Image (cartoon, helix red, strand yellow):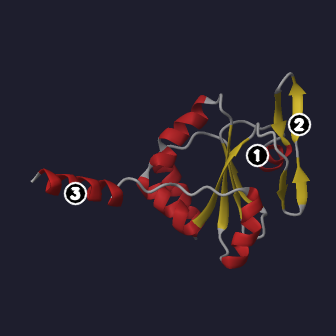
Amino acid sequence: MKKLFLLIFFFGISTTGFCQLKSYSFEEIDSLQQIQKRKVIVFIHTDWCQFCQRMKTTTFKNQEIIEKLNSEFYFIDFNAEEKRDITFNNHVFKFQPSGNNVGVHELALQLGTINNQITYPTLCVLNEKNEIIFQYNIYLSPNDFKILLEKLEK
């Protein structure tokens, strides 16, 4: 009886609630677009931003959102303070230091600047040609994010 219970328990866990959000790198997007054209959602954040961390633990843990992002979009989880060079859209973007071990990545500035400033978190949506079609720079709850995804599918 215990074995049957454990089998049912583990089967239930593996089939519900543990779908992982697939996150791609910028370098992967070009080849993925050649296989299947999709919009790209870039989540631009920092480690110190409380609203960014809240989106990671609420919005991006929601199973409906995970399933929709995995099936309809390419998702990029991008730390704006990433220090490595990133090649995207035939251009190399670099980290721009602004002080002692602080700064922002050029690509975060390119994709996340709204009204001449960057704030976190920022969502940037790219079309299949890597052109910005939408930017939003405020925390989105799971329900608000679902509404956004519905509008982007059209």
Q: Residue furthest front?
A: 3
Earlier in the chain: of badge 2 and badge 3, it is 3
Q: Earlier in the sequence, mark 1 or mark 3?
A: 3
Q: Position of residue 11 (x, y in %)?
A: 28, 59
Q: Quadrant of residue 109?
A: top right
Amino acid type, callout 2: Gln
Tell me the amino acid under the disc marked 3: Leu
Pointer 1 residue:
112
Q: CA distance from mark 2 to mark 3?
A: 52 Å
User: Which residue position holds label 2?
Assistant: 96
SS state under label 2: strand
Whether residue 150 is visible: no
Identify the secondary structure beneath mark 3. Answer: helix
Q: Which mark is residue 7?
A: 3
Q: Nearer the viewer, mark 2 or mark 3?
A: 3
| Crowd rating for badge 3 (residues with CA inside 10 Å; few <14, some 14–19, many 20+) | few
Earlier sequence position, callout 1 versus callout 2: 2
Which marked residue is nearer to the observer: mark 1 or mark 2?
Answer: 2
Residue at 21 percent across and 52 percent down: it is 6
- Of residues 38 and 95, the one nearer the viewer is 95
